[in-house]
Image: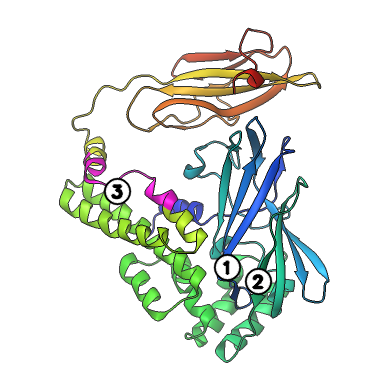
Amino acid sequence: MLSSSRLGILWALLLAASSLTISAAPSLEFTMDLAPAHGLPGISPAMKVTVINNAADPVQFAGASFRMEVTREDGSAFVLECKDNSPCGDYQSAWFETPARHGTFTVKAKGSRSFLIGMVNSPFFLDARMLQPGRYALRMRSAFGEQPSNSVSYAVDEPAGEDQIVWKGLLKAVSESDFPGNETFLRDDMLALMKAHPRSTYSRAWAFWRDLAADGGPRDEVGLILGYLANGVPESAEVDLKVTLASVYRHQAQASADAGLLDAAVAAAAQGRSILQALQVGTNSYASGAADIMLAWPNWTRDDLKKYGDQFNRLNQPKLKSIESRVNCVSLSNDGTFTAWFGYVNPNDAVLAIPIGPRNTLGASPAEGGQPTAFLPGDRRRVFSVNVPVGTKLVWSLDGHPATAMADNGIGRCEDTQ
């Protein structure tokens, strides 16, 4: 059965984009790619949206979301966007290297960041207007209002046969929902309809997620996913299932390493790694992006798995050194505030976790203000920033090592430390 923590990782990997909040980002550009270029109504393509920062300073987002501008063949247009309380996803994600508060991430100066929007968490393609067959021109724009992304053509196919029956039920379900999203397919009426038409594309696309939400959830995850893939699924669902399967193999490898079964761990990791390597070389940018992200995670090699098992069993462990917080620079604003950028130095060879609390405090209490809770090895600069009034003495303390930021305490200006 998928654990709640594994499901959280899975949803993070399949996450996407919705309503965007930016402090100041005049030099942001956006590009969008999706695959496939057509599909049945309500079955979202897999999308990759890249945010490019052309400025000389990093840009920190307090939340990450986008709106989609849609133009029909007749020239009429509408906008799809996330609204409050809509199912737009959570952007706390390990691969953004900012395991901090909800949504916080940074785009480095002259750098870029990509969002992967999978079939199961796209807020756009279940809008009633996108459920009508036809050809659409799509552009992505941030809620801040910068220039939109490139335009991408997408065709919503005309359903036929069993697909048409399920589509009509989907139209009714969406009309009855304030915020239609992936949970629409998990309504009792939609589950009954797909069960009655098991060969429909909709049923095959959502079989795994339907079983995952059922009482008890799937147990033989590998066998079930391989079975779903063998039955044939839409391309966007196929990518998500393969990424999920690779994640399952990786978790099996870690469990075997914990049990001291290193050869079994290496074999499971090799199966997951081969799936991801195949996705890397395809033309689907969502698939290759997801594979790149997952292969950058640890515990794919024999050495990593041995270290992982040793850590779990507390074998051959060196004494850990303390992590030190640092103030990297400050930036003054014209409104009587200043922004302090914090980083840290982790002298250990492993990622360490320090939850928010007495060992990880910002300000006068363990309040959470965007500071990380997982610490990568090495000198990590400008990990997060905090904006406070001039005159504030802002202290971030890690394991008793304080880093104090003030507007006038001699810390270098950010604009001088690129």
In the rendered image, the quadrant that contains the C terminus is top right
User: Mark 3 or 2, which is nearer the eye?
Assistant: 2
Identified by mark 1, the residue type is Pro
Residue that mark 2 sits on: 154
Highlighted magenta segment, given as a residue range: 292-306
Identified by mark 3, the residue type is Trp
Residue that mark 1 sits on: 45
In the image: residue 320, left or right of residue 240: left
Identified by mark 2, the residue type is Tyr
Report the residue at 60% width, 38% height from top.
107
In the image: residue 306, left or right of residue 198: left
First in sequence, mark 1 or 2: give its number: 1
First in sequence, mark 3 or 2: give its number: 2
Whole-angstrom CA distance, mark 1 to mark 2, is 9 Å
- Element under disc 3: loop
Colouring chosen for the image of the structure: rainbow
Foreground residue, 298 or 190?
Answer: 298
Image position, residue 204 (x, y; %)? 47, 78
**Pointer 3: residues within 10 angstroms few (<14), some, or many (20+)?**
many
Residue 62 versus residue 210 in the image, above or below: above
In the image: residue 254, left or right of residue 243: left
Kindly identify which numbered label has been placed on residue 216. Answer: none
Magenta stretch secondary structure, dominant: helix
In the rendered image, the quadrant that contains the N terminus is bottom left
Residue 189: in sight, yes or no?
Answer: yes
Foreground residue, 52 or 260?
Answer: 52
Q: Residue furthest bottom?
A: 161
- Element under disc 2: strand
**Pointer 1: residues within 10 angstroms few (<14), some, or many (20+)?**
many
Are the residues tagged 1 and 2 within 8 Å (C-beta)?
yes
